[in-house]
Amino acid sequence: MELSIIGSGYVGTTIAACFADLGHDVVNVDIDEDIVDSLNAGHAPIHEPGLDELVEAHAGDRLRATTDYDAILDTDATFLALPTPSNDDGSIDLGAMKAAATSLGETLAQKDDTHLVVTKSTVVPTTTVEVIGPRIEEASGKTVGEEFDIAMNPEFLREGTAVEDFLSPDKIVLGAQSERAYEQLDEIFAPLVERAGDPPVVKTGISEAEMIKYANNAFLASKISLANDLANICKEFGVDSEEVLDAIGLDSRIGSAFLGAGLGWGGSCFPKDTAAIIAAARSRGYEPRLLQAAVDVNDEQPKRMLELLEDRFDPEGKRVAVLGLSFKPGTDDVRSSRAILLIDHLLDAGADVVGYDPVATENMRVHFPNIDYATSAADALVDADAALVATDWDEFAALDAQFDEMREKVVIDGRRIVTRRDGLDYESLV
């Protein structure tokens, strides 16, 4: 099929490249000319394992990019893959989505045949039906369900494994209002279903599909926070939390995924999505106490890590290495990274901070242009009084003799990845 994707961020670029790899002809529409030029030159605008190879393989053939909305006229379906950032109250900002819906509607006014519009961005229930659809109707003069259809196809992509997650999904969720929309969605996803070995396909309503995305992330965020809460209790009793969590993960009702206790969750999805669904619930008069507790536990983990450091010494005037700046390994994304909270506090306390990350240094430099950045973990440790491990990159597990270059040799491990050894004042957060 001929597909158009509006937006070329993590989701838009990934699904465009993957759809092209599945045999569809795809055009990315974006307002950023640099991103458009990068895609057309065969380079992904983001760091994501496997994505550069797909973009390079299909650019100029089944994948192209443009700033011109008229390219949509030659396509059968359009996916809206735009950011929905948080407002101050936690609700989502639909500014980019509304603007795109208006531009899309103005373009569809020129189109004679029907068109399918699929929301891919994470939006609260009723958004596609009550906001996106009517906005396209107003701009196009066409009617939903007659001259164009709307649908929702939530994404379940993890940064660092987004390509694999798309091409080998646990499930595919298709929300629509009409048989015509379902038929087009089936045609779009048929190559993926065949390649992935017939994963479950959930067909549901549009608002149900929107809610499935939030429920998915809310459950996982809560599971991590519960694991951290239990691990914090274990630490108070001198109990090995890793052994406890490994054991309960063997229970088929619980499962081992997302039981890794530590510094907590960050990134672009969990913080934004939990805040959004909490705000949405409150807007309807319901107080989601358990979800709020999950957020509260998550916010406390960096504070607990800093307290462990302050038990050793006052950070003022001390050189502290922060190892890992991205919110998780495998990505250069620093949005809501736990390292940001750590660095903020260290700077407020008068510490001399040096940061290191294999790929995320430049993105963190935007937040902290005046701290030192090392080119390797070993360099970051030289003359450091303490090291705080914020991200579980594999290379940190291999550190050993490099710790000998530290002054006071204090290591606080927020991800339980460094091996305890003689000569280190080592403590795991949990």
Image: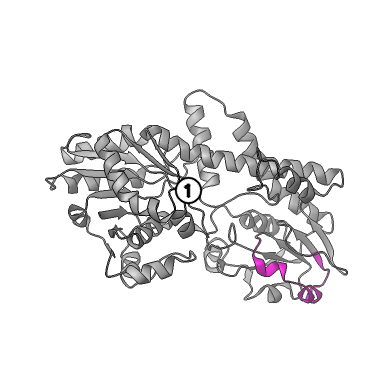
Question: Which residue was labeled with disc 1?
Answer: 156
Give me the residue at 80% from left, 53% from top. Answer: 308
- Whether residue 171 appears in this view of the structure is yes
In the picture, residue 300 is in which quadrant? Answer: top right
Residues rendered magenta in the picture: 392-410
- Whether residue 89 appears in this view of the structure is no
Residue type (three-letter) at the residue carrying disc 1: Phe
- In the rendered image, residue 364, in percent from the top left (x then y), is placed at 56, 63
In the picture, residue 327 is in which quadrant? Answer: bottom right
Taking 18 as reference, is 417 left or right? right
The crowd level at tag 1 (other Cα within 10 Å; few <14, some 14-19, many 20+) is many
Give me the residue at 64% from left, 74% from top. Answer: 374
- In the rendered image, residue 403, in percent from the top left (x then y), is placed at 78, 72
Instruction: Identify the image quadrant of the N terminus.
Output: bottom left
- Magenta stretch contains residue 88: no
Quick one: 135 or 218, which is closer to the camera?
218
Quick one: 222 or 87, which is closer to the camera?
222
Give me the residue at 20% from left, 36% from top. Answer: 138
Is 142 placed above or below 337 here? above
Is 224 placed above or below 368 here? above
Quick one: 49 or 315, which is closer to the camera?
49
Quick one: 425 or 208, which is closer to the camera?
208
Taking 254 as reference, is 188 left or right? left
